[in-house]
Amino acid sequence: MKSKRVLSGVQPTGALHLGNWLGAINNWVELQKTHETFVCVVDLHALTIPHDPKALEENTLTTAALYIACGMDPDQCSIFVQSQITAHSELCWLLNCLTPVNWLERMIQYKEKSIKQGDNVSVGLLDYPVLMAADILLYDADLVPVGEDQKQHLELARDIAQQRVNAKFGDKEKPLLKIPKPLILKEGAKIMSLLDGTKKMSKSDPNENSRITLLDSPDLIAKKIKKAKTDAHLGLEFNNSTRPEANNLLGLYAMLSGLGRDVVEKECSDIGWGKFKPLLADATINAIEPIQKKYYELRNDPTELSQILTNGRFKAEEVAQETLKRVQVALGLLSTDKI
């Protein structure tokens, strides 16, 4: 019997990359074996930045298919699209009415992204942490896998649930909303850019050479690794703060080759970058090949992917509506049962 419930998700704003896979999805694959797991394609969050509607629809399907190709098993977890569960938007509105604006204005990511967007900052950019709180709280999640950059948003969800909902409208012995705990991801949670070993690999980086996506061709992978930033030292090593690129690329090789950190550090302790980069390229291509094979099988059979998402939606809808109704009643909204 599975013990605790876990909720995870990724925005469909471009092809998933090595950081998404090694830093997050690999952990979800393991969690689904021991936890009740809900995995969401959070397409509503993608609306907070300018987007192409056709690309968003395609990227949503791509992201869902890549979840499965990376090892998420529809028989062990529920895979669904956020916008197809209306309770996400409905609970978000209820939480909006209870969340102080100054709580949102102090969010670090809002400050950073609003500077980039200038006068085009939308209400959605300010408010998306509340939608994220609704995503989490709808499913009575016990645990939420998060990286360091998302810990503040999870804390906000916890504060909203505890201080603004449970404390004001709940019962001490039976809280309205479950307070989720963070599950800090293990080694590999932070994969860095190929062009800057001090910055996280990101889909939003304008330079595509900074990341390797899970759908890159072998030739493109080799070219990107060849262009990866290096240093002037001979030999690679871990844990040298003056060599962030060595730490990052050697770490990638350890994970993608399956050899582990001790073995690769010994293997690469006295070789140059010219010899190391082909090793990393081959390991990357071999590791990604089965993911791409499964992905294209799914995309060539849209009926199977559609059925998986439909089944996931039914399971998620049942849980989400139960939570939403509980909150609606507590806040005094008239139930259809009483008409």
Image: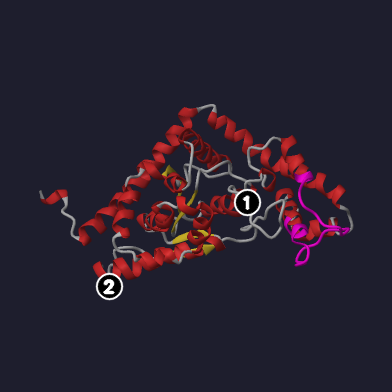
| Range drawn in magenta | 225-248
Is residue 233 found inside the magenta-colored segment of the image? Answer: yes
Mark 2 Cα-neighbour bin, 10 Å: few <14, some 14–19, many ≥20: few
- Where residue 113 sits in the image (x, y, percent)? 51, 56
> From what the image shows, is residue 68 above or below residue 268?
above
Who is closer to the viewer here, 23 or 6? 23
The mark found on residue 172 in the picture is: 2
Question: Which residue is at a point 41% across and 63% down the rendered structure image?
Answer: 104
Question: Which residue is at a point 51% across and 27% down the rendered structure image?
Answer: 301
**Tag 1 secondary structure:** helix
Magenta span: predominant SS is loop
Q: Which residue is mark 1?
A: 19
> From what the image shows, is residue 222 above or below residue 258?
above
Who is closer to the viewer here, 60 or 316? 60
Q: CA distance from mark 2 to mark 1?
A: 41 Å
The mark found on residue 116 in the picture is: none
Task: Please name the amino acid that badge 2 sits on.
Answer: Lys
Question: Which residue is at a point 66% across and 45% down the rendered structure image?
Answer: 207
Q: Is residue 299 visible?
A: yes
- Where residue 44 sits in the image (x, y, percent)? 42, 46
Question: Which residue is at a point 30% across and 50% down the rendered structure image?
Answer: 90
Who is closer to the viewer here, 90 or 52? 52
Is residue 335 found inside the magenta-colored segment of the image? Answer: no
Q: Horizontal placement of 145 versus 80: left or right? A: right
Q: Horizontal placement of 1 versus 176: left or right? A: right
- Where residue 323 sits in the image (x, y, percent)? 30, 55
Quarter placement of the N terminus? bottom left
- Where residue 95 sits in the image (x, y, percent)? 32, 59
